[in-house]
Amino acid sequence: MLLETVGLDLGSSPTEQAKLEIGKGPPLRVVELYAGAGGMSLGLQRAGFEVVRAYDHMQSAVDIYNRNVGYHAVVADLGNVASIAPEIAKLKPDMIAGGPPCQDFSPAGARIEGERANHTRTFALYVCSTAPEWFMMENVQRARNSAAWADARDMLKNAGYGLTQLVVNAALYGVPQKRKRLIVVGRLGERDGFLLASIQQAATPEPMPLRAVFGNLFGDHVYSHPRALDRRGVWSVDEPSPTIRNARRPQPATYAPHRNDSNYSEVSGLYFRPFHDARGVYTLDEPAPSIVRTSRERPRSSYIDNPHPDDPTPAATAYILTQNDTSRIQGFPADWDWSGCLSRDVDQMIANAVPAPMAAMLGKEILRRERGESQPDVPGNFGQWLTKEKRMPSQMVANAKWRVKRARQLLGGRDLRCLGAEAYALETAFEREGLAKAKRSEIRRALRQFREWQEHLQAGI
């Protein structure tokens, strides 16, 4: 049935209607693919989702995920769709989420589409074969122009999903780094762009600076006289101290600060190993560049001798990041347990992660729409079209826009692609609300005009 295909719940019983109320009903169940160390799952949990299963091919990533997020993750070859898709279908998830491998698209990679790029198609196969109401996919922004995403998009559209596709800057979604990522949110039966305005409006007015993460973590510090000139002397009271020796003494006035001293709140620059001709030094009052596996490497002599002209301070005196620093910048909690893995593998897992704060903000917008707490915007261009094409005076234009908004409220925030399904759902809502016939007619007319305007836009008229 068409109405079942688009995921409509048109029942009018009190129990069914209560699910649309704020905070009511069970949490949405989500399965994550390519879960890595658990950044996306952590964010979705914070948003209010129930994570029921997560898959990744790396045993070390699964171990870290289970130790920190919860015992949902299993090791699996996600290329084996025939075996894993039936398992996911039995879980009956409301959403499939994940960030397929992006190295083939990444500016830090070879930019040649190979086996890893093919996982974008695999992600779409899982969504199409298990048919959850929602999906959310994250990837690097270059993926939007790839052949792999073009194929995946066609599969998802043919399966009945409306797509909201945009590139977001993580610095505007709770993460102190300028990390631009492609986000695609799909929902069965919707029109394309159905969640675009809500995600854009969720962005903060200003990017998050590094100080938001590190500014209150410096605490108290102690001086332990270094045994060699190349060792640091300042240690935080929140970390293990060096071996206590008779050499403990007050910090001398002549002590030259070491780049790894814990009181780096006074340091005016942090070094992030740059790619190509990018900057290497950043202040605490701006976002970091996108975290990659090599972000915390020390500056090479070639960079020190030939620094970027926009560096705020010399790289030789800038603070050198620790692994815990890059973990925090990527959105992991301070107490995240990375133990039991090779340091290089941890650096890679941190770099590959979907930042939890960003996933949480996106997840909240999905849940708000699921619960009918938000509706798609009515663009101002619609009013301009009514004025020009329908010769409507300003008051009638305002009334028509309000009635379209009212229709979307009655539809629980749905922006349905099928006009028949939309009309059926609207009539059901009219009956539930007990609206007068005149009000019903006005809302129907306004919604018809809105759809006519949309068709003109699509046709380029």
Image: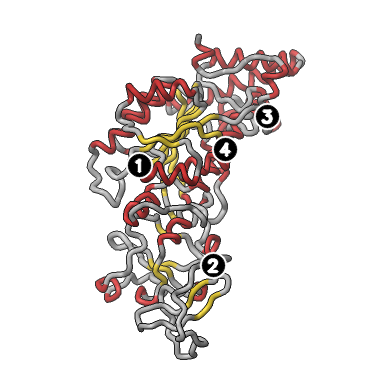
Q: Nearer the viewer, residue 460 or 356?
A: 356
Mark 2 highlights which residue? 238
Q: Nearer the viewer, mark 3 or mark 2?
A: 2
**Residue 85 against residue 142 in the figure, above or below:** above
Mark closer to the chain start, 1 or 4: 1
Q: CA distance from mark 3 to mark 2?
A: 41 Å
Mark 4 highlights which residue? 365
Q: CA distance from mark 2 to mark 1?
A: 31 Å
Mark closer to the chain start, 3 or 2: 3
Give the number of callouts: 4
Q: Nearer the viewer, residue 361 or 319?
A: 319
Mark closer to the chain start, 2 or 1: 1
| Residue 112 found in image quarter | top left
Query: Please, what is the three-letter code of the amino acid marked with disc 2?
Result: Asp
Mark 3 highlights which residue? 24
Element marked by disc 1 = helix
Q: Nearer the viewer, mark 2 or mark 4?
A: 2
Q: CA distance from mark 3 to mark 4?
A: 16 Å
Give the x, y percent position of residue 191. Answer: 49, 25
Query: Please, what is the three-letter code of the amino acid marked with disc 4?
Result: Glu
Mark 1 highlights which residue? 59
**Residue 153 against residue 11 in the figure, above or below:** below
Q: Nearer the viewer, mark 1 or mark 4?
A: 1
Give the x, y percent position of residue 283. Answer: 46, 68
Name which residue lies at 60% across and 14% down. Answer: 423
Mark closer to the chain start, 3 or 4: 3
Element marked by disc 3 = loop
